[in-house]
């Protein structure tokens, strides 16, 4: 710990050494944006219980037998040398404090590097911490026999109890400014290797090199990362620093910079006070970078099986693990995001400032780190989580006018290689995506295959423009082909694949001019169009200011109603006649100046016909006047109406004037129960009526003969009544006129050889 006293200007914390004891006053964590402490929140003390592991097999295995423990919810294994690696598997079993059940063996990731640029001596090597939920028992085993290497010294299990306390929701946090004053003469510097406040040793014997007993000199210092720039030719994949790429990144400074404005809005962030940070754990002042050139995305806690209500406890546990177990100055990540999308302030110093973090060894001096709580090796992160990552990235990079979809050269602060085998040499610059995964800068699986695969979407969200913008509907208009038709008032609906959190506004454009403006969460807007043809588009403005425009929709505003160029008319048609159902044809023709949509028959029955249909078959009750009402609609919704009325009337054969011999036949199959039949050549029946359509009704069989039909004294047809099947009340012949008038219909028996018989069942006319 640095030997000077901190006074937090914002009222967060004041610390001083008094008689060798560190005294803290007024600890509240970061304040809200209004400068007032969050009454709902307060520091929550975390405990770290430790147990040394017993090493066996000549240093190739280690274990901690199953045992009861103090309550904890997160654990990890640490060791003395931060540069050392565990060769082999590290596994734990835990007992649930709720159910008493033991878990299966759980792996602890060992690929992290605890060495961090700028951190004080005494840091320890460590596995990735794992969240296991409230537990009270543990068992540990390490097996390095398969690799043949020895395990590092000082192996220890650290179990974190995040504590309980009041925490708040989101708060707009401000940088907690402080001033450093010289240490008082009697102040005693606390070794980073001494037991941290709140940490409790389990009583297990300490091994040589264990920082609970070792002096500061016993812990090896972190490997130096002082950059040395080789000739450009020695590294074809790297570019040597130029005048715009300094040979060394500016050293972090405790001087508090001014927060620059961003091109993107700041998302809601839960403050350190909001998640219950105990600021006395990390009293040293924050270090600041000159700017933020890149964002590194991580995953953490090794499990996605947690409730979002536990997220503050997980963040507190990460904080305690980084500080009390690994010996860092503060939590390593600048921001932490849970699977529900809640954003937590990480390392202190001010979310809107370029705080020097500890997250991507070798590239911390020009970047910020965002960790998503969970493991994303086999399962993708929730969309709300990736959106929050993108929102933070857009805001932070926007403060330094950096395009989240672009690339940047970063100066390596250490020599090493990444997950893909690319080697880095300290002091040389290398190209990175502005939003990269931890594995791009270090040899690690982090942030997991699935989350890494989501980085392109995160970049797209953060950088813009709004993607997938398309008009989905034009309500108040009819669609014909690719053209919409309306009477004038429309509601245009749209969609975009970019989430609304990244959209500043939408604008509805009509013929290139703004007709309406809507918020970034809107999915529709209204407009009134003048008569004529219009080009309609939607323009989206991304939070970065970039714009995108949808494809054009053609919308025709039309106020002219369709017309019936051929008025509806009725005509009797062939078919079976009943007194309640006389077959007839309804005919019409409707047109529109723009686009006819449909024609509806509204009475005496409801039917809908397409724009090209001009006739339909119906039936009507005899002796009843019926009005047939029709409405034509165009695609814009305009309508025109027309109607026709008619009364089908049945004239029985007995009402006809007879000539020749006719025989009366009786059957319920005949109209009125009777019919006339004749085999006499030239026998005739004559009906006189006033109407506009007529139909001759007969009975038919295989032996039926033929008859001549005369209309108004003129022979118009020879009708053959023969049928392979017997038919009754069959309208076999029809005649229609343009208007109603007096007419005479006469049928004459032909006397067909071998089948002379004609049976008539009357005449139907329409008046």
Image (spheres, rainbow, N blue to C red):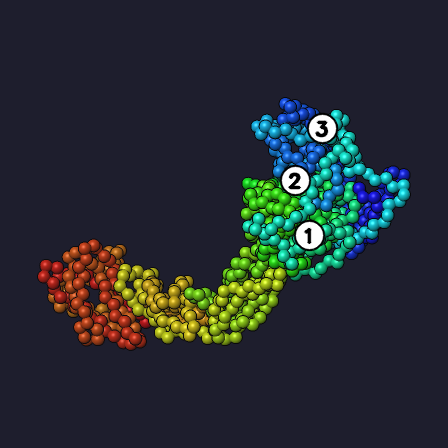
Query: Of residues 598 and 257, which is closer to you in this image?
Result: 257
Residue 276 is drawn in which quadrant?
A: top right
**Residue 748 percent coordinates (x, y):** 16, 68
Crowd rating for badge 1 (residues with CA inside 10 Å; few <14, some 14–19, many 20+):
some
Crowd rating for badge 2 (residues with CA inside 10 Å; few <14, some 14–19, many 20+):
many
Q: Residue at x 51, y 68 (%)?
A: 536
- Regarding mark 2 in the picture, which secondary structure is present there? loop
- Regarding mark 1 in the picture, which secondary structure is present there? loop
Is 747 rendered above or below residue 319? below
The dot on residue 249 is: 1
Q: Nearer the viewer, mark 1 or mark 2?
A: 1
Which of the two discs, 3 and 1, labels the residue nearer the N terminus?
3
Q: Residue at x 75, y 52 (%)?
A: 253
Which of the two discs, 1 and 2, labels the residue nearer the N terminus?
2
**Residue 16 percent coordinates (x, y):** 86, 44
Which of the two discs, 2 and 3, labels the residue nearer the N terminus?
3
Quadrant where the C terminus is found in the figure: bottom left
The dot on residue 52 is: 3
Crowd rating for badge 3 (residues with CA inside 10 Å; few <14, some 14–19, many 20+):
many
In the image: residue 307, left or right of residue 454: right
Residue carrying label 2: 113
**Residue 235 percent coordinates (x, y):** 57, 49
């Amino acid at each position: 710990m640095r030997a000077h006293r901190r006074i937090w200007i914002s009222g967060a914390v004041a610390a001083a050494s008094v008689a060798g004891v560190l005294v803290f006053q007024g600890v509240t964590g970061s304040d809200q944006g209004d400068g007032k402490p969050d009454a709902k929140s307060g520091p929550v003390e975390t405990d770290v219980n430790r147990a040394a592991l017993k090493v066996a097999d000549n240093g190739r295995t280690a274990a901690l037998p199953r045992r009861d423990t103090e309550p904890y919810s997160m654990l990890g294994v640490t060791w003395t040398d931060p540069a050392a690696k565990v060769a082999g598997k590290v596994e734990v079993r835990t007992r649930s404090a709720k159910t008493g059940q033991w878990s299966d063996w759980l792996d602890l990731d060992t690929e992290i590097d605890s060495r961090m640029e700028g951190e004080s001596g005494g840091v320890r090597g460590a596995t990735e911490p794992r969240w296991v939920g409230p537990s009270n028992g543990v068992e540990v085993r390490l097996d390095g026999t398969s690799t043949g290497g020895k395990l590092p010294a000082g192996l220890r299990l650290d179990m974190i109890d995040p504590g309980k306390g009041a925490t708040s929701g989101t708060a707009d946090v401000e940088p907690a400014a402080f001033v450093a004053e010289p240490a008082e003469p009697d102040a005693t510097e606390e070794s980073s290797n001494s037991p941290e406040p709140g940490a409790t040793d389990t009583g297990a014997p300490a091994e040589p090199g264990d920082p609970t007993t070792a002096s500061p000199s016993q812990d090896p210092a972190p490997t130096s990362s002082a950059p040395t720039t080789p000739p450009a030719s020695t590294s074809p994949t790297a570019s040597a620093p130029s005048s715009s790429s300094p040979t060394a990144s500016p050293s972090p400074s405790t001087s508090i910079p001014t927060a620059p404005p961003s091109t993107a809005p700041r998302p809601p962030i839960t403050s350190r006070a909001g998640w219950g940070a105990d600021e006395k754990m990390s009293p040293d002042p924050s270090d600041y970078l000159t700017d933020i050139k890149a964002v590194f995305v991580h995953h953490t806690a090794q499990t996605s099986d947690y409730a979002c209500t536990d997220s503050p406890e997980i963040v507190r546990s990460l904080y305690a693990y980084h500080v009390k177990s690994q010996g860092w100055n503060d939590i390593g990540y600048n921001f932490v995001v849970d699977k529900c999308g809640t954003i937590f302030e990480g390392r202190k110093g001010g979310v809107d400032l370029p705080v020097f973090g500890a997250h991507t060894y070798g590239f911390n001096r020009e970047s910020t780190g965002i960790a998503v709580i969970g493991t994303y090796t086999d399962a993708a992160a929730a969309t709300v989580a990736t959106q929050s990552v993108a929102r933070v990235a857009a805001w932070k990079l926007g403060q330094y006018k950096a395009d989240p979809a672009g690339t940047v050269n970063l100066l390596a602060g250490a020599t090493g290689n990444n997950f893909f085998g690319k080697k880095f040499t300290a002091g040389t610059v290398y190209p990175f995506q502005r939003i990269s995964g931890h594995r791009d800068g270090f040899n690690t699986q982090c942030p997991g295959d699935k989350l890494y695969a989501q980085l392109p979407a995160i970049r797209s969200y953060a950088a813009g423009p709004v993607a997938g913008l398309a008009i989905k509907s034009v309500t108040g208009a009819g669609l014909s082909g690719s053209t919409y038709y309306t009477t004038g008032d429309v509601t245009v609906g749209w969609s975009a694949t970019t989430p609304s959190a990244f959209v500043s506004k939408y604008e509805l454009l009509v013929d290139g001019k703004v007709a309406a403006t809507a918020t970034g969460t809107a999915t529709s807007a209204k407009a009134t169009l003048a008569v004529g043809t219009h080009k309609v588009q939607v323009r989206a403005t991304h939070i970065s200011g970039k714009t995108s425009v949808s494809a054009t929709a053609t919308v025709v505003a039309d106020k002219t109603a369709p017309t019936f160029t051929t008025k509806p008319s009725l005509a009797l048609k062939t078919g079976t006649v009943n007194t309640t159902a006389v077959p007839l044809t309804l005919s019409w023709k409707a047109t529109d100046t723009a686009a006819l949509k449909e024609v509806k028959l509204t009475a005496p029955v409801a039917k809908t016909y397409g724009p090209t249909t001009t006739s339909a078959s119906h039936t009507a009750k005899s002796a009843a006047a019926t009005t047939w009402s029709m409405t034509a609609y165009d695609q814009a919704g305009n309508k025109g109406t027309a109607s026709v009325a008619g009364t089908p009337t049945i004239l029985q054969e007995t009402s006809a004037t007879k000539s020749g011999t006719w025989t009366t036949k009786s059957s319920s199959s005949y109209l009125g129960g009777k019919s006339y039949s004749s085999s006499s050549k030239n026998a005739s029946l004559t009906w006189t009526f006033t109407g506009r359509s007529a139909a001759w009704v007969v009975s038919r069989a295989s032996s039926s003969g033929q008859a001549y039909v005369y209309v108004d004294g003129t022979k118009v047809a020879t009708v053959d009544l023969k049928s392979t099947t017997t038919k009754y009340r069959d309208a076999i012949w029809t005649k229609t006129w343009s208007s109603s008038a007096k007419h005479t219909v006469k049928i004459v028996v032909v006397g067909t050889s071998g089948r002379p018989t004609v049976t008539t069942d009357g005449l139907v006319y329409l008046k």
